[in-house]
Image (tube, helix red, strand yellow):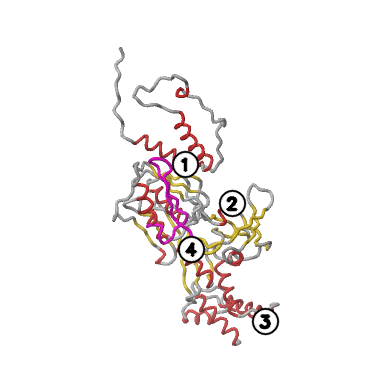
Amino acid sequence: MPHFFRHTLTALMLVLLAAPFGALADEAASADTAAEPQGQLPLQSLRNFADVFNQIRLSYVEEVDDKTLLENAIRGMLSGLDPHSDYLDASSFEDLQNHTTGEFGGLGIEVGMENGFIKVITPIDDTPAARAGIQTGDLIIQIDNKPIKGLSLQEAVTLMRGPAGSKIVVTILRSGISAPFEVQLKRDVITVASVRGEILEAGYGYIRISQFQNRTGQDLKKELSKLKSGREPLNGLVLDLRNNPGGLLQASVQVVNEFINEGLIVYTEGRLPNAYSRFMASATNPADSTPMVVLINGGSASASEIVAGALQDHRRAVIMGTRSFGKGSVQTVLPLSEESAIKLTTARYFTPSGRSIQAQGIEPDIIVERARIEALTSSGIEITEADLAGHLGRGDGKESTSVSRKAEKGKREDLAADDNQLYEALNLLKGMYIMTKPKTALVETAIQ
């Protein structure tokens, strides 16, 4: 065998973490057999690889160095497995590390590949992509008038990167719109606050988790504490996981652990012994017991689905919205050096009841599609007894005014128009509270 072929085979075997020398020697001795024993490297395929490598090296129209060719070979092996396995060069490896800490550069979208185009899994809250109106499910077919077709996911993502403040034009293909359209965005340093909370109205809180980062569990605890420290007791909570692309597994476990005291949260299964993991709730701190609705949609993926699935199986929350994305696979980052790594799918997620999330997603308990709601009475004029001149008082010394009712009605209509799913979640929480609150003593009135 020529020296070049021996050198290439050795390099490839190092990349593949090849079988032990003894197994390879046995295989070489029986290279002419029709079938290769399982677990041994196919020598003829390695020869084919070395031949293709040499042809490219000698005959390609432009000279390509050996390092680039081998990196492309690694990238090709991984991209052929599934949409989430990938080769991480120095830039990609650094971006991944920054992403889990909550600060990174770019447009603020979680993306994947579909039919050769970039598919938007979700825009991240308060980023250039979200502000420009990019939506879950959009297909990016061109970047700065350069077609995406034929590029790898990593190459396309590289085109979208750039210094903060620089502009980029993406061409979007959106379901329901007949022709592609262009969106201009300005790149920015994306700093994502993964958790934020607010009071929707007296007694009802809202917590939004945009992605799962290192501090998500701690930040959730703080936001929950703030909501519960208000004047009114917390009668219900909406946990919003819509368009949350996921993140760290451990962060999702910490979030679920805030709401249940015991039991299984999630488990994983794979081929390797260390791919079998079970994550249990800890009773170190008492779990929060506030009645809860969890909102999900097609942009809720991975860690979001772990949280929704666990809370659903434990009957700790009502899941509302639309079916989630269905990314139920575990990616392990395996460093190759200080500057590069591979991201390899090594296991699948399962909910406590044994449901696989992969390509299935979480089905909501109550399906509520995103919709635009308009009131049938648009005049805003509503005459009640309180508006009539000389109307009788309530008899308890208190006066009812139509002004306060109109103001409250205006708030409800605004929420229904802006976010009907959140509006329905709030209504459900109110109904749950009404049916469970202590009964008041009835006053019997004697009829003469």
Q: Which residue is mark 4?
A: 103
Residue 206 in the figure: left or right of residue 83: left
Q: Which residue is mark 3?
A: 58
Q: What whole-number distance in Å separates the C-alpha atoms at marks 4 and 2?
A: 21 Å
Residue 113 in the figure: left or right of residue 316: right
Choose the circle earlier in sequence order: 1 or 4: 4
Q: Residue 4 versus residue 342: which sits nearer the camera?
A: 342
Single out the mark in the foreground, 3 or 2.
2
Q: What whole-number distance in Å separates the C-alpha atoms at marks 3 and 4?
A: 43 Å
In magenta stretch: residue 421: no
- Tell me if residue 201 comes above or below residue 336 in the rendering: above
Q: Which residues are magenta?
A: 191-218
Dot 3: within a 10 Å radius of its alpha carbon, few (fewer than 14), some, or many (20 or more) residues? few
Q: Which residue is mark 1?
A: 366
Q: Which residue is mark 2?
A: 133
Q: Position of residue 50 (x, y in %)?
A: 60, 79
Q: Position of residue 159 (x, y in %)?
A: 61, 65
Single out the mark in the foreground, 2 or 1.
2
Dot 2: within a 10 Å radius of its alpha carbon, few (fewer than 14), some, or many (20 or more) residues? few
Q: Residue 406 versus residue 194: which sits nearer the camera?
A: 406
Q: Say which amino acid is labelled 4.
A: Glu
Q: Which quadrant of the figure has residue 270?
A: bottom left
Choose the circle earlier in sequence order: 4 or 2: 4
Q: Say which amino acid is labelled 3.
A: Leu
Q: Which quadrant of the figure has residue 273?
A: bottom left
At a point 53% along the width and 64% down the height, the residue shown is 105
The reply to whether residue 89 is visible in this rendering is yes
Residue 334 in the figure: left or right of residue 80: left
